[in-house]
Amino acid sequence: MIEIVDIHKSFGDNEVLKGISATFEPGKISLIIGGSGSGKSTLLKCMVGLHKPNAGRVLYNDVEFTRLSFEERIPIRKEIGMLFQNSALFDSMTVEQNIMFSLDMFTEMSRGEKVDRANFCLERVNLKGTNDLYPAELSGGMKKRVGIARAISMTPKYLFCDEPNSGLDPQTSILIDELIQDLTEEFNTTTIVVTHDMNSVMGIGDYILFLYKGHKEWEGSNKEIAHTEVEELNKFVFASPF
Ligand code: ADP
Ligand code: MG
């Protein structure tokens, strides 16, 4: 389980997160939704330690991550698989090298073991045989899948995906959602997906957190979202093409 408590984050005078609290349950998919610039990516980055919150706490299974030193965070960092917004693959590395990046950094696995693991991950995202391609040779959907293969390389407990559907056609988008659902079940991960996509919200959201101007404006299930009285959420829901 992941808990965030009263997270504040400012960049200079720009207060992006104004006290966000939430609980993310294991084996479930939680969604963070909200308009562009509402602080979704910033919140995820605070949770994995890429940004330092100005105040607030992040706890992984009751361990207070935000109090740990860089070194002390490594065991938890190893359990987090992250798909970054725009995939963030290393352009100068092949698909296989991208997937093996964390294995190279964090494990003592032999070259053969790492290749086996990369092949397993590639197969899992339906990209068998693409090992030697470079990111520039991949479509948008394939890049997302390589990003996901990299995110699961270390068999994560926590799976974070920042806009896994952005820039994809609706069919590919559904496949990515199904993949995230399957992986969550297979690895029993605590999964958090940042999305704009209302199909994802209705399809895979066990729990939804709606950010608006740095506040948690609403939280609930996808069954409740269509009946909410929260004006800004309604605008968000009904402005989105289903
Ligand atoms: P979202 O992911 O919801 O679109 P972001 O979290 O990326 O929003 O950004 C929220 C706000 O924080 C924006 O106003 C953005 O300009 C600002 N911001 C994000 N990252 C940085 C940064 N590294 N430095 C300064 N401002 C940032
Ligand atoms: Mg973002």
Image (spheres, rainbow, N blue to C red):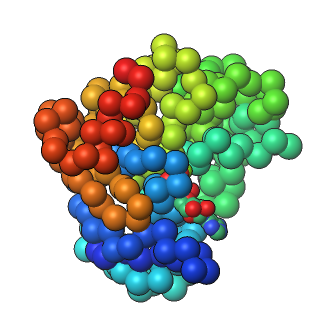
Q: Position of residue 140 (x, y in %)?
A: 66, 26
Considering every residue shown, the one lying at the far top of the view is 171
| Quadrant of the drawing holding the N terminus | bottom left
Q: Residue at x 49, y 68 (%)?
A: 16
**Is residue 74 in sight in this rendering?**
no
Residue 144, position as x, y percentages in the image = 60, 33
Please give left or right for residue 125 compared with residue 209 in the image. Answer: right
Residue at the spot x=36%, y=55% of the render?
211
Tell me the residue at 49%/74% (across/down).
15
Q: Quadrant of residue 117?
A: top right
Asked if 135 appears above or below 2 in the picture, the reply is above
Would residue 161 be found to the left or right of residue 158 on screen?
A: right
In the image, is 51 to the left or to the right of 179?
right
Query: Residue 98: x percent and y percent?
Result: 71, 43
Q: Residue at x 30, y 61 (%)?
A: 216
The single residue placed furthest to the right in the displayed view is 92
Task: Determine which quarter of the picture holds residue 51.
Answer: bottom right
Residue 175 located left or right of residue 22: right
